[in-house]
């Protein structure tokens, strides 16, 4: 019994909250709790990835619709009402004339606090 007192500590399971004895670095009371905890974490990350990809796809479709209408600028408020989310872009850099240049896949544009302008499709290099 002295062995248990020296090398084992009481811990709380990260999944079910049940108290158990084990190694100091042990986090789960059983293999099933360990699997449930890790599966939940993977599911949460996958769900977040799917939400981000959906927002990017929605932004791309809205910008693509502007290009089809041959519009090169739009009020940001108008785009937000259509479902555009300014937080989701695939690229950002300081462009010419100190404007912020953003990209959403192959569509690039400049953005101020109230509007986007110079919406254009980037040329494909054939790669």
Image (tube, rainbow, N blue to C red):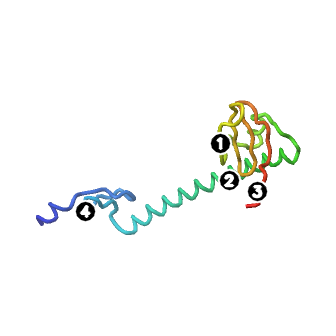
Q: Earlier in the sequence, mark 1 or mark 2?
A: 2
Q: Which residue is mark 4?
A: 23
Determine the residue positioned at 58% across, 53% down. 48
- 4 or 1: tag closer to the N-terminus: 4
Return the residue at label 2: 54
Between the residue at mark 3 and the residue at mark 4, the CA separation in whole angstroms equals 57 Å
Disc 2 from disc 3: Cα separation: 27 Å
Query: Could you tell me which residue is drawn at 25 percent across and 59 percent down?
Result: 24
Judged by depth in the image, the label closer to the viewer, 2 or 3, is 3
Q: Earlier in the sequence, mark 2 or mark 3?
A: 2
For the N terminus, the quadrant is bottom left
The CA span between labels 3 and 1 is: 20 Å
The residue to which callout 3 is attached is 125
**Residue most extreme to the bottom:** 31
Q: Which residue occupies 45% across, 62% down?
A: 38
Front label number (3 vs 4): 3
Residues tagged 1 and 2 counted as in contact (Cβ below 8 A): no
Q: Which mark is residue 92?
A: 1
Given this view, does label 3 or label 1 mark the residue nearer the observer? 3
Quadrant into which the C terminus falls: bottom right
For label 2, count other residues whose C-alpha is less than 10 Å away and answer few (under 14), some (14-19) or many (20+): few
What is the quadrant of residue 28 in the picture?
A: bottom left
Observer-side mark, 1 or 2, equals 1
Q: Where does the image place residue 70, in percent across and percent down from the top left?
A: 88, 43
Say whether residue 38 is left or right of residue 74: left
Q: Nearer the viewer, mark 4 or mark 1?
A: 1
């Amino acid at each position: 019994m002295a062995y248990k007192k020296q090398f084992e500590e009481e811990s709380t399971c990260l999944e079910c909250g049940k108290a158990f004895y084990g190694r100091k670095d042990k986090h789960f009371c059983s293999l099933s709790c360990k699997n449930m905890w890790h599966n939940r974490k993977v599911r949460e990350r996958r769900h977040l990835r799917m939400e981000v990809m959906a927002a990017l796809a929605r932004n791309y479709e809205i910008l693509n619709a502007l290009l089809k209408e041959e519009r090169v600028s739009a009020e940001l408020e108008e785009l937000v009402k259509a479902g555009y989310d300014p937080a989701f872009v695939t690229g950002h850099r300081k462009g010419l004339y100190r404007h912020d240049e953003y990209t959403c896949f192959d569509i690039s544009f400049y953005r101020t606090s109230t509007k986007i302008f110079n919406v254009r499709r980037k040329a494909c290099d054939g790669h």
